[in-house]
Image (spheres, rainbow, N blue to C red):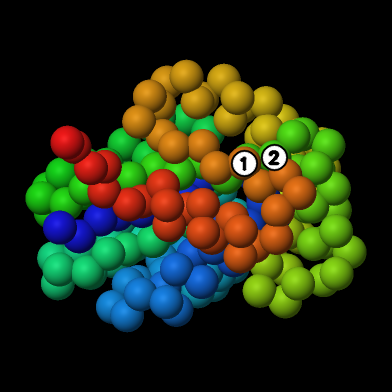
Amino acid sequence: MPRLIHLNGPSGIGKSTIARSYAERHPGVLNLDTDHVVRLIGGWRDTFFETFKAAQLLTRAMAETHLRTGHDVVMPQLATRVADIAPFEAAAAECGVEYREILLTAAKPAALERFAGRVADGDAETKGIDDVVQERGGTAIVGRIHDQLAAYLPLRPHCVVVPTDGRVPEQTYEDVVAALAPVRRG
């Protein structure tokens, strides 16, 4: 059965890296990053939040279309409110597929350090979105996101948490794949 795999977590935690690895190693999987979709819309930097809402609608439509072909979608996307992901859960239900949420996390100091390091490195793939986060407070924003995720997690009993502290991306990838493995009943 196809799955909509939602990789959640703060900025800089590795969602996009893991999603890219997953799609590269699983033919037919769509790596659907809303941050990439938002950058396709003209003027997105000037009207980021309004544009992001439009990008989420496009992302949902793209996910539904791809899921209906019988293939997985991996979606690296921060969500700190149930309302933010409800449309994606509904899309999965409407397509008759499984919705899986995995929260990539790290201790708050490590999460802040990762984001700051990514900004300092000037990662071309995340540059535009990182600029928006920097303009709005940078690591202070990431710290608030970390706290919001801690409050959000108890509302998501089926969310699987994958710690990334002290782990290289390949180890995190392996943990995500293990978390996605079917549960054997015996």
Give the crowd class for mark 1: few <14, some 14-19, many >=20 residues within 10 Å.
some
What residue does disc 1 label? 163
Q: Secondary structure at mark 2?
A: loop
Residue 20 position, x and y percent, is: 51, 71
What residue does disc 2 label? 106
Residue drawn 42% across the image and 77% down it: 25
Residue drawn 26% across the image and 42% down it: 183
Q: Quadrant of residue 130?
A: bottom right
Would you say 146 lies left or right of 131 here?
left
Residue drawn 22% across the image and 69% down it: 71
Which of marks 2 and 1 precedes in the sequence? 2
The N terminus is located in which quarter? bottom left
> In the image as oriented, which residue stretches furthest toward the front?
186
Q: Secondary structure at mark 1?
A: strand
Q: Is residue 37 visible?
A: no
Q: Amino acid at mark 2?
A: Ala
> Are the residues tagged 1 and 2 within 8 Å (C-beta)?
yes
Residue 181 position, x and y percent, is: 32, 52
Please determine whether, in this image, residue 43 is positioned above or below residue 172: below
**Numbered tag placed on residue 97 in the rendering:** none
